[in-house]
Image (cartoon, rainbow, N blue to C red):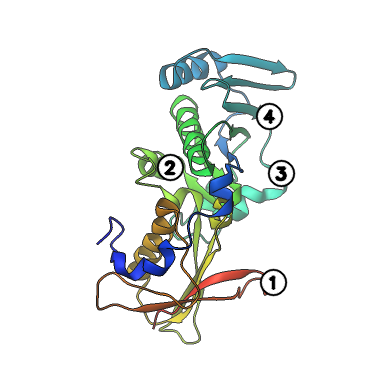
Amino acid sequence: MTDDGFEDEDFDEADEAGESDEGASGEGIGLCMVLLRERTVDWEKLNAHLQSVFGGEVEAINSDPLSGCLCADGTLFLLHMPGPVPNQEAEEAANYYYFWEDGAAEVAQHKSHVIVTATGEGDVVDRILLATRGARAVLQAAESVGVYWGNGSIANSTETFLQMSEEADRDSLPLYLWVRFQLMPGETEDRVGLYTLGLSQFGEQEIEVVNTSWKVGPMMEFLYNVAHYILTSGNTIEDGNTIGGDENQKITVSYEPSVLDAERTVYRIDLP
């Protein structure tokens, strides 16, 4: 059994598929926005904290009214924008989210934001992990509301982000910070569905479940483990393959048009 709770034999076909093109080519960056309660940033305090976290020099960048810095050997760029995220994007990302009941109202209180961009060597997972570390540093040094992860259409509170990212590494990815696992109604009141937004930033298809009788908690955990396995193993689940948490569980995965966008193909997981 893998660390994600799946039997290795259930992914024999997936092992042959190899890594995704984006992960192999090293394309993609880590990008998020830290939502601040004030319109200004104490760069002296923040730069000192960044230096303690990443070591090396922190290069200040000032171009009024914008300010920022480069750190982590020039692979992490922070830029302060003296206003809220435009077009209420962050509020919409926090709205109706399973893990942040009053998220939209709280996000609406932010007065400025810091754009965190991670580049450099490695693959997109490395860069997203670096951006996560950068966001953590800002959260620890400035009064903040939370973090908006645009490529996952998701926003999380400061407390949630700090807690879930504390031990983040390549073997333990904090996917709830990067990928939206969004519930949707089933055909009857006792059924439910779910879709993801954000796996595409890793070069992967999104996941969808339609009209299942599974309870929300077990369904979220199972699908999280599926996504985590795909991203940590570098494997792709083949169309028609089966997955499961043990040798007796066989759940079919097929490639289907998304219920959100028929032109996009997703992993449709056939939970009964």
Q: Earlier in the sequence, mark 2 or mark 4?
A: 4
Q: What residue does disc 2 label?
A: 161
In the rendered image of this protein, does residue 29 appear above or below residue 63?
A: below
Mark 4: give few (<14), some (14-19) or many (20+) Cα within 10 Å.
some
The answer to which image quadrant residue 264 occupies is: bottom right
Decide: is 10 above or below 210. above
Q: Residue furthest right?
A: 64
Q: Which residue is mark 1?
A: 263
Mark 1 or 2, nearer chain start: 2
Amino acid type for the residue under numbered disc 1 = Glu
Which label number is shown at residue 34? none
Badge 2 or badge 3: first in the primary sequence: 3
Picture quarter with the N terminus: bottom left
Going by the numbered disc 3, the residue's amino acid type is Pro
- Report, in whole angstroms, how far the alpha carbon at label 1 lies from the one at label 2: 33 Å
Give amino acid for label 4. Pro
Question: In this figure, what is the number of numbered marks?
Answer: 4
What crowding class fits label 1: few (fewer than 14 Cα within 10 Å), some (14-19), or many (20 or more)?
Answer: few
Mark 3 and mark 2 in contact (Cβ < 8 Å)?
Answer: no
Q: Residues within 10 Å of mark 3 (few under 14, many from 20)?
A: few
Q: Nearer the viewer, residue 253 or 175?
A: 253
Q: Picture quarter containing residue 258?
A: bottom right
From the top left corner, tell me how far across and down residue 188 is, in percent: 47, 87
Q: Residue furthest front?
A: 16
Q: In the rendered structure, find residue 86 and report the number of the disc placed on it.
A: 3
